[in-house]
Image (cartoon, helix red, strand yellow):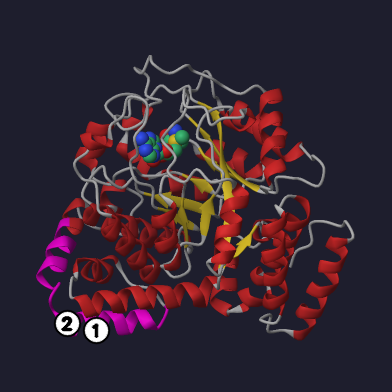
């Protein structure tokens, strides 16, 4: 099997031999400071790096060069994403699952956990609770079970979620994290106006993949790995990829993740919209210690920095699987979206206390959304509830164009300020509102275009007077 980034066959675009050759190359050159400087110079052009170049940076442990990598990642993040952080929450619809994934408590053989699937009335109640927190963007999650959670069920849930308008609340973007499916199903998801289709590869190592997914439809490596091509064929422009770090060696996964991004760009003309970097967590009958490839917080942050440098235009997502301390560090190095106030159980948002019985994994950041918003602002970020891009048709390469043209400061930045203003009026605690209003005042000045600045000021007044949902 030869490496071919343009091939539509999983084992050719994620080629094991090419990955192993890359790792050898990275290891052989990890002290080659001349080469590392050349790669860093290339990265400074903001055009990204290929998987080989990025793997050399990941392997490099020269203290000064590692600091250069971190500084560059931080600078690229500032240049492309400013100080905005987009917020979202996961919504678990069903934990029925017919797969046998060894790391996930929803696996078929787990009889400890009650199986639950939200009715449409329950979806409405969950969404109302999420709106009352201030969320505007959700990622829906479900196990794979064609009988209990067929696509029709997912589509019904999407319809329900978009239909709930509670007080000033609304869910304006639904990202979807469900199992790999057919082109036809992806087309139906596209027609249901989803935002990003997200599917984690878990591990790119085929042998490990098959061992970790011993039974169920997810066992099929090619079906899973080629899913994003089918999603794009079905008209979904924005896809989100990711690895479940801890399952296999991080350097193998890192190289393969970038090869996946290169493949999507080469074949479809646009790379992934987002990259997620989840790590395996403790869960009902799952002990992360069973997977001996866990990686240190330090290496985890280095991976994020190298991703930021390698694919500057791709958003990066970090969830509440990580502690506030790790989140603070990694956000600085390149993360653009985080979840907040998350419950990872089916029906969890309607409960007073965080329920554990149907939980998919243990949450390490237990703060409320308001606490997360407050914390972000104190750390110098603008929490954003913006959902404008896909609603304005800026998906796929049109979004990438916006990034590359530098117009983000006249577009995403004002949208962040206006959606933050809505949050402060409708949901924030008094202290959060005070900090936020001062931040908005200060940040208006950094909108470069005078006309846009004027329009933002007028719209902020209208928001204060009760109008909602302005966007550029
Ligand atoms: N069922 C869908 C599929 O087949 O891809 C995805 C939905 S699942 C609810 C979302 C993700 O949670 C999985 O892709 C996996 O990466 C992650 N996950 C599963 N078990 C986990 C654990 N113990 N710790 C952290 N993340 C986990």
Q: Residue at x 61, y 29 (%)?
A: 352
Rendering coords of residue 41 (x, y %): 31, 85
Residue 171's spot in the image, x, y percent? 70, 45
Query: Does 256 lie within the magenta span?
Result: no
Which quadrant is the C terminus positioned in? bottom right
- Image location of residue 73, percent across then percent down: 39, 73
Residue denoted by label 2: 33
Q: How many marks?
A: 2
Task: Decide if residue 432 is on the left or right side of residue 295.
Answer: right
Most foreground residue, 401 or 27 = 27
Give the magenta-colored segment's residue range.
20-46
Q: Is residue 253 above or below residue 380?
A: above
Most prominent secondary structure in the magenta stretch?
helix
The reply to whether residue 116 is in sight is: yes
Image quarter of residue 70: bottom left
Please tell me which residue lies in front, 304 or 225: 304
């Amino acid at each position: 099997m030869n490496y071919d980034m343009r091939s539509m066959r999983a084992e050719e675009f994620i080629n094991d031999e090419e990955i192993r050759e890359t790792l050898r190359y990275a290891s052989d050159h990890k002290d080659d400071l001349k080469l590392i400087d050349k790669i860093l110079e290339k990265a400074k052009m903001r055009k990204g790096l290929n998987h080989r170049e990025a793997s050399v940076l990941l392997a490099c442990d020269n203290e000064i060069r590692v600091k250069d990598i971190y500084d560059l990642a931080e600078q690229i993040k500032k240049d492309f994403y400013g100080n905005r952080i987009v917020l979202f929450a996961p919504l678990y619809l069903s934990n029925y699952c017919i797969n046998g994934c060894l790391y996930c408590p929803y696996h078929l053989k787990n009889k400890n956990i009650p199986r639950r699937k939200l009715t449409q009335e329950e979806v409405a109640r969950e969404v109302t609770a999420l709106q009352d927190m201030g969320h505007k963007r959700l990622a829906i999650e479900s196990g794979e079970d064609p009988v209990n959670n067929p696509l029709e069920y997912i589509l019904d849930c999407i319809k329900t979620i978009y239909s709930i308008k509670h007080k000033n609340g609304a869910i304006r973007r639904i990202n979807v994290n469900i199992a790999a499916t057919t082109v036809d199903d992806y087309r139906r998801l596209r027609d249901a106006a989803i935002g990003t289709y997200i599917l984690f590869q878990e591990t790119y190592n085929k042998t490990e993949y098959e061992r970790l997914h011993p039974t169920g439809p997810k066992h099929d490596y090619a079906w899973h790995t080629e899913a994003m091509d089918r999603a794009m064929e079905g008209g979904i422009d924005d896809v989100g990829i990711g690895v479940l770090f801890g399952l296999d060696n991080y350097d193998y996964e890192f190289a393969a993740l970038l090869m996946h991004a290169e493949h999507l760009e080469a074949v479809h003309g646009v790379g992934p919209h987002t990259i997620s970097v989840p790590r395996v967590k403790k869960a009902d009958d799952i002990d992360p210690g069973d997977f001996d490839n866990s990686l240190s917080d330090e290496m985890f942050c280095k991976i994020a920095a190298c991703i930021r440098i390698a694919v500057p235009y791709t958003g990066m997502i970090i969830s509440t699987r990580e502690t506030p301390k790790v989140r603070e560090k990694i956000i600085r190095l390149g993360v653009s979206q985080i979840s907040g106030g998350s419950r990872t159980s089916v029906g969890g948002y309607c409960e007073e206390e965080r329920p554990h019985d149907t939980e998919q994994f243990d949450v390490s950041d237990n703060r409320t959304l308001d606490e997360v918003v407050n914390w972000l602002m104190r750390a110098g970020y603008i929490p954003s509830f913006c959902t404008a891009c896909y609603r304005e048709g800026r998906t796929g390469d049109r979004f990438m164009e916006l990034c590359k043209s530098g117009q983000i400061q006249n577009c995403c930045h004002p949208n962040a300020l206006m959606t933050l203003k809505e949050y402060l009026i409708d949901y924030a605690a008094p202290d959060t509102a005070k900090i936020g209003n001062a931040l908005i005042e200060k940040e208006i000045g950094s909108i470069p275009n005078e006309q846009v600045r004027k329009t933002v000021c007028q719209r902020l007044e209208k928001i204060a007077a009760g109008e909602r949902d302005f966007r550029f």
